[in-house]
Image: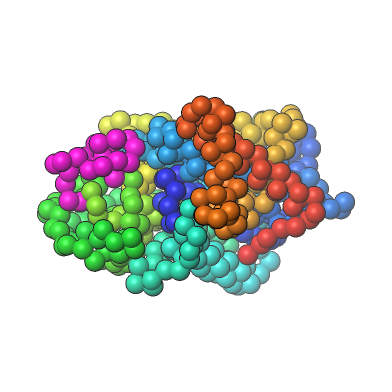
Amino acid sequence: MESRVPLLSSSSDHPSPSEFVDVEDEIPPSSTGIHQASSDPIQSSKPNSADQKPRIVSLDIFRGLTIALMILVDDAGGAFPSINHSPWFGVTLADFVMPFFLFIVGVSIALVFKKVPNKSAATKKVIMRTIKLFLLGVLLQGGYFHGRNNLSYGVDIEHIRWLGVLQRISIGYFLAAIAEIWLVKGTLVDTSTAFLKKYYIQWILACLLSSLYLGLLYGLYVPNWEFNLPSMAASGQLDGESRVVQCGVRGSLEPPCNAVGMIDRLILGEKHLYQRPVYRRTKECSVNSPDYGPLPPDSPDWCLAPFDPEGILSSVMAAVTCFIGLQYGHILMNFKSHKQRVLLWSMLSLLLLLFGCVFGLFTIPLSKPLYTLSYLCFTSGLSGFLLIIIYYIADIKQFRKPTVLLQWMGMNALIVYGLAACELFPAAIQGFYWRSPENNLVSATQLSLQSLFHSQKWGTLAFVLLEILFWCLVAGFLHWRGLYIKL
């Protein structure tokens, strides 16, 4: 979602896969048919076999739509800054990608762990998958791969980025999955009251996580701090002049003096944070705002400071999105008819949306980099409504042909994320060039479309749409061949 930088060294602005689980179980039949749960938060594990019941197709479509949206805003966001991430406050199209992924992770966890015969074994699997997903994120997003237009690899461990999109997803998955394994009562759900009794401890945990976030965000004192200006060297290492940022405040939500950034600087260290934060596109930091651009003459020093959009404290709040998705999955599991599910989802989504709007307008502004409470509620409510729309089209009306491309992509989310969003595939293709690195198939295709449309912006958009179609077809081929990648 941020303009492309070394292989997903980009900001969270990527949302990516959700989670990886390989258990496939059926869920209670709906009033108009029986459906099969998607087995995996981030991707499905296997194609349907003859003896398996149908999947919950809407989950695959939702996941595929999110990945397509991620590719769109990442690759076209530079040409169309209005769809790129909001520079700090507010939301744009790109700012929905991460919440969509976290939300669908939560829904999938509820389906995967609806039956847990051995809690210890299930916990061990969750821990192992969390570790694998976190380490994969470090590999893809830590700076080792340098992405398109940079045919090199390798990262100085002193400057590796420890957190990122996949790492945030792994944290949310871990907390939600553990809560689903250990904090669900064995109550038979035959009434609304029984439903609340069965899952109320999870709601308490989600409230505690939110309270912890709010308490630290508004309660911690942020003193003055210093950082090293990026050197002009091509390496971009932080070995330049030291500058001091004046803070001495408590409860600030502005870019230079918030508790989210302070905690990351103290625990992770300045050198291990994302070096091209979105606030470089604010009016204070860019003459081309809301796009990147040269610094204004009177720009503050903090414009060049690092900030991680998938930081420690904001990831605590982001995990609550998984807990919200978890409850949507519980509704899907415990209520039999389409009408009941849609009604309950609609009520919950409307409530979240209203909370998000009220908080955003009167108390806490919407901010993806901080993952504020208003942003959490607003994006979760819209995630719920989007799930309702897709569920109605794909699982109630079973109108699936127009969405089959997205369904394929959703069933192969992990491989598409790694190859496309993390730019492994285009970087590999660019490695084959004629005489100079600029003469490669990827660049030639994009330039040809820009010439065809007589516009850099619209040619770039056409290239990105072609890219999305290509990956949909690749995912469809993998599905047809029964090839899947799981952690």
Quadrant position of residue 387: top right
- Viewer-proximal residue, 60 or 70? 70
Figure disc tally: 0
Q: Quadrant of the N terminus?
A: top left
- Viewer-proximal residue, 117 or 271? 271
Residue 167 falls left or right of residue 415: left
Residue furthest top in the image = 454
Magenta range is: 279-302
Residue 65 percent location from the top left of the image: 60, 39
Q: Is residue 292 magenta?
A: yes
Q: Is residue 16 magenta?
A: no
SS majority, magenta: loop
User: What residue sits 39% from the left and 55% below the top?
Assistant: 310
Residue 30 percent location from the top left of the image: 74, 38
Residue 397 percent location from the top left of the image: 74, 29
User: What residue sits 58% from the left and 66% below the top?
Assistant: 129
Identify whether 308 is placed above or below 350: below
- Viewer-proximal residue, 102 or 428? 428
Residue 49 falls left or right of residue 361: right
- Viewer-proximal residue, 112 or 192? 112
Residue 235 falls left or right of residue 465: left
Residue 340 percent location from the top left of the image: 64, 33
Residue furthest right in the image = 50
On the question of residue 203 being in view, the answer is: no
Residue furthest front in the image = 435
Identify whether 305 is placed above or below 280: below
Q: How is the image coloured?
A: rainbow
On the question of residue 302 being in view, the answer is: yes
Residue 322 falls left or right of residue 355: right
Q: Quadrant of the C terminus?
A: bottom right
Quadrant position of residue 429: bottom right
User: What residue sits 15% from the left and 58% below the top?
Assistant: 243
